[in-house]
Image (cartoon, rainbow, N blue to C red):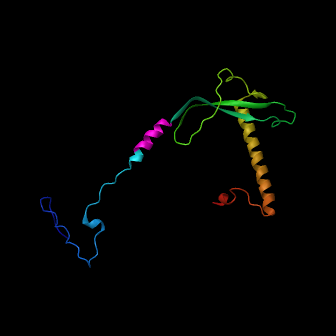
Amino acid sequence: MEHLSINDQPPPPPFPQGPGQPGLLGGGRPPQPQQLPAQMFTTAAQLLDLTDILQQTKERIFVPPGTQSPAQTRGLYADVDRGLFVVRGENVLLMGEIDLDRDDDAPPGYDLADLELVQTLAKQKKAEEKAKEKRKVKKLSTIGFEGENVGEALL
């Protein structure tokens, strides 16, 4: 082990390589700093152009007719204020019709209801559909059918 100080000269470069000697990686030169591709900067600039901001967003939860009772003829819905959304990225498609006159009207066949009631009914309906689908997949598996994403559930 050498005891070097700051004032000492750096060690001499390695001896030139002969034809029979193995070479050093990079030929003994220090590694170059990593260069970033020019596309990275243009892509970052393009992403700024692909930013959409959605203001005053609302999530509308629907409960179809007949969920509470078979005699129910109209469905229920509730609005949840979600606020501001920032959508960034490529391959984003926003489709929809904006009609400010009809924005506050109730959807045809649905009545506005309390948020907790609609969320509870929607969760119950979703759980019933999940159980129904599970029973269906179980019956189909007895005859050799393997449903979608069945193998992933084991992971």
Q: Is residue 126 magenta?
A: no
Residue extent of the magenta highlight: 41-50
Image point (53%, 42%), residue name: 90
Indicate left or right for 30 with 76 as reference: left
Residue most extreme to the front: 19
The residue most toward the right is: 71
Residue at 73 percent across and 25 percent down: it is 106
**Is 3 situated left or right of 93 in this image?**
left
Q: Position of residue 2 (x, y in %)?
A: 17, 69
Name above or below for residue 137 compared with residue 12. above
The residue shown at (41%, 47%) is 39
In the rendered view of the protein, which quadrant contains the N terminus?
Answer: bottom left
Magenta stretch, overall SS: helix
131 vs 39, nearest the viewer:
39
Residue 130: where, in percent of width, then height?
75, 48
Front position in the image: 135 or 109: 109
Q: Quadrant of the C terminus?
A: bottom right
Q: Is residue 87 left or right of residue 5?
A: right
Q: Is residue 55 above or below residue 48?
A: above
Q: Quadrant of residue 116?
A: top right
Report whether 88 appears left or right of 150. Answer: left
Residue 141, image x and y in percent?
Answer: 78, 61
Is 51 drawn above or below residue 5 in the view shown? above
The residue positioned 65% from the left and 58% from the top of the image is 152
